[in-house]
Image (tube, rainbow, N blue to C red):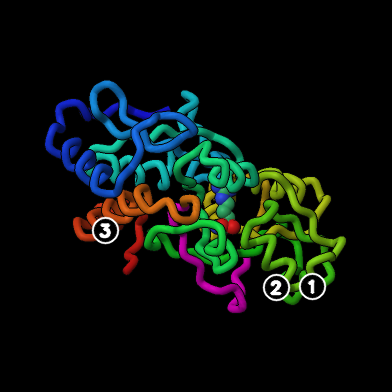
Amino acid sequence: MLKKKKLFSLITPIAAASIILAACGASETGTNGSASEDGEGTTTLKVGTDAAYAPFESFDDKGNIVGIDVDVVNAIGEELGVEFEINNVGWDPLFQQLINSEVDLGISAITITEERQETYDFTEPYYEATQLIVTKEESDIESLQDIADKKIGVQMNTTGHFAAQDLQGKTSANIKPYETTPVAIQELINGTVDAVIGDNAVIIEYIKNNPESKLKSIEDDSFEKEYYGLMVKKGNKEVLDILNEGIQKLKESGKLAEITGQEIE
Ligand code: ARG
């Protein structure tokens, strides 16, 4: 859960955040996941995530949700005196919980796509990514074309899933959607699927952390660049403005690059 960080001594940022919220007409009801203030006047935003996605969000040994996305929102919180309460809700449910206003924002290495932008608003991008293929070390698969007729495991409704559909057609029975990316990779190790398509940093992290699984990753030029954003329900301008202000500050100070290990405009 959330690590408290001397927030109560940061009078000025708290005041600043209150002003921002007041200016945007944010409600302070504290119900239904809407931006709320506690007795101390700290704004708390409810965050939903799928914490099976190292290095962006995963559980550490002590049961805390940690990772790049968590560091990004906590750094925004420090800048602006806002608290984030992070809940592991799962990938697919996250989208519905945002619509129902059960959470204020989603952090989950979420790619900004045109289709999602019909229902959600995204912050400015904070991370650049692309897809990778992962397969067994001994496999002769070398490119995306090589898996055109193979069984592909994906995390359901991710951009990896969409890439597999672009390749094989939307209704292909050879595409196997799973609830999480680690489960999809486990099914590759078990031999249920021949390859998995997933986000590059996550695949690389998995291979690094599981050398005994003997997996390799394959790049392919046809995978486009993707950009991650923090996601809110469409029209939730007050929360979006806070997040964008925070990201802007982290970009200017160099803190974002420090957290993510990459430069982004
Ligand atoms: N970037 C991909 C997408 O937006 C996958 C994100 C999955 N994130 C997660 N925490 N499981 O579709």
From where the camera sits, is residue 73 visible?
A: yes
Q: Residue at x 54, y 66 (%)?
A: 113
Of the residues shown, which amino acid type is indicated by label 3?
Gln
Report helix, strand or loop for mark 1.
Answer: loop
Residue 10, quarter of picture: top left
Does the magenta-highlighted stretch encompass residue 223? yes
Magenta stretch: give its range: 218-231
Among the two numbered marks 3 and 2 on one chain, the one whose residue lies closer to the N terminus: 2
Main SS of the magenta segment? Answer: loop
- The residue labelled by disc 1 is 148
- Label 1 neighbourhood size at 10 Å, few (<14), some (14-19), many (20+)? some
Of the residues shown, which amino acid type is indicated by label 1?
Ala
In this rendering, which labeled residue sits more in front, label 3 or label 2? Answer: 3
Q: Which mark is residue 144?
A: 2
Q: CB of mark 1 within 8 Å of CB of mark 2?
A: yes
Question: Horizontal and vertical percent for residue 145?
Answer: 74, 76
Q: CB of mark 1 within 8 Å of CB of mark 3?
A: no
Q: Residue at x 72, y 57 (%)?
A: 136
- The residue labelled by disc 3 is 248
Question: Horizontal and vertical percent for residue 139?
Answer: 76, 63
Of the residues shown, which amino acid type is indicated by label 2?
Leu
Among the two numbered marks 1 and 3 on one chain, the one whose residue lies closer to the N terminus: 1
Residue 142, quarter of picture: bottom right
